[in-house]
Image (spheres, rainbow, N blue to C red):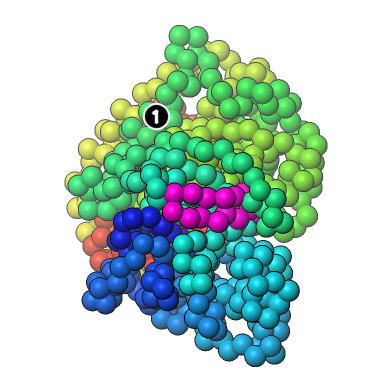
Amino acid sequence: MCGIVGYIGDKNASDVLIKGLKRLEYRGYDSAGLALINGHLDIVKGKGKVLNLEKQVNSQKLTGKIGIGHTRWATHGEPNDVNSHPHLSQSGKIAVVHNGIIENYGALKKKLIEQGRTFHSETDTEIIAQLIEEIYENGSTHEFEKALQFALKQIVGTYGIAVVNSDEPDKIYVAKKGSPLLLGIGENEMFIASDASPIVEYTKKVIYLEDGEMAVVTKGNYEVKTIDDVTLTKEIHELALSLDAIEKAGYPHFMLKEIFEQPNSVADCLRGRLRLDNHTIQLGGLVDVMDQLVNAKRLVIAACGTSWHSGLVGEYLFEYLAKMPVEVEYASEFRYRDPLIGEGDVLLVISQSGETADTLAAMREAKAKGALVLGVCNVVGSTIARETDAGVYTHAGPEIGVASTKAFTAQVVVLTMIAIAVGQQRGTLDDAYAAKLIEELNRLPGKIKQILEQNESIKEMAKLFTYAPNFLYLGRTFNFPVALEGALKLKEISYIHAEGYPAAEMKHGPIALIDAMMPVVVVAATDHTNDKMISNIEEVKARKGRIIAVTNEENTEVKELSEFFISIPSTEDCLSPLLTVIPLQLLSYYIAVNRGCHVDQPRNLAKSVTVE
Ligand code: F6R
């Protein structure tokens, strides 16, 4: 979703800002812009890619030592040049870039118009610049910093903002409520960004702002305070992120790189946590809360999108291995229906980015009601990771492709480890089976590698289905969530309509769609449901649907019934989602590439959805 970058120092700010905006492209955006202070404000902005912005900046030969930049993902007002950020105040002296949503912008705008201000855009952001200036020029203070604080107190909603004022050409003001913002501390220079990716090549020293905080940033210095003007001493964190991890390393797309990273990302996620000597699981982040989790009255899992799918796999795992009843909720639905959750209950939230607004809101709701809140996050230091009571990092490394791949497998690995550990403590998992699962988890990176060796044949198969208008994905038990995930991957990057269904449910509706044009991807584990799955395949074939099966080499019956077959090494059924999902990621990837789609930045999508 929208991205913010800011710079103040001796480098050419326009170069730093453009480079930073390119690093933020993965978040998803439709327009880009920047403001430089050169006595007055130089503004360049417009609909389209950062590359267009760069061309404009170069053709105008714009340079400077201080500036702010933005990639916009439209919420209020269509993506066009006028609605792009930065937005200016009436005098043109104040420029604002903003992530988030101002909920009371209508009322504020009406008042500002009555006060004689003219608006140019349809955005909620423009009111921030105008409101600050109204207070600064005609209000109770002529101190800019105070005017900013007063304005922020009138605003209802979420924001991460960076503000410059040409009257104060050596300062950038930033503030945060609900949308992430961090400061990067360099040698006699400072950076601002909505995530670490634009900062990491310059400095590893960062400060994370919390809600209700602001900062006044000057060259090589900063002051953090609350918007009530209480000065704060903030901890300086060391970024673990490396520059290599956020570059493509020779792959044509981040998505393909991330699919191929999975043998390593799964190994990284397991590292130090699997004890092969005594067949136990060590999760340092849960040690203090393990008793509460093991004895929880209820376990609720909340997440969005792909993370919700991994939560569904988690439900099957917890029920199977730990015999715990689990509910899996869309974070957005959970949050808004006054959920029945309280003391003695555990809410486990799952989020790659750790910034998803709906998940964050669900987590805060459950916390306020007294539940223990646990997190499974990928981004270290993210808001969800910081605000949960305890949790486990997935250690998958930065995921830049908008379509989540390695984060999903790492999430499922973490959920499997938690379910095993809880099962062992609850006495629901016998020692021999626990040992078998732990040994098998350790073998998974090698098995994922074996699947990736089928890359070329999956690429060939994708050619045959590139122009299919629809796809159906069917799975049962542990692989029903994989069917959902396969369908989501395909639709988000190739824009082909796809549905994931529990295989048996097909006959209650989707079967009406099946004809000779319909590819049906069958994710078939060899568990006790295999015979039933075979019947479902027969039902599809009877209607001339085209079967693509993902299952074990030994599953000869399924193999013989299928037009196409992708083989998966044998594993325990409950671990099979970690393997069956891999070919589905590759299939979606190649279909999207064949269709000429922008795989890493699909239309309308954002990597980190920071608005509710
Ligand atoms: C799909 C995808 C999204 C995210 C969802 C949650 O490929 O990436 O569906 O899974 O927006 O994001 P996180 O996990 O960051 O909370």
Q: Is residue 450 visible?
A: yes
Identify the residue position indicated by label 1 in the image. Answer: 268
* 316 left or right of 34 in image: right
User: Based on the displayed image, in which of its 4 quarters is residue 409 positioned?
Assistant: top left
- Give left or right: position of 234 versus 45: right
Which is nearer the eye, 141 or 319?
141
Q: Residues within 10 Å of mark 1 (few under 14, many from 20)?
A: some
Magenta part of the protein: which range? 210-224
Q: Position of residue 138 (x, y in %)?
A: 68, 81
> Does residue 568 appear in this view?
no
Asked if the magenta segment contains residue 427, the reply would be no
> What residue occupies the far top of the structure in this picture?
277
Q: In this rendering, would 63 be left or right of 609?
A: left
User: For this rendering, which residue is in front, 105 or 593?
Assistant: 105
Q: Amino acid at mark 1?
A: Asp
| Dominant secondary structure of the residues highlighted in magenta in the image | strand
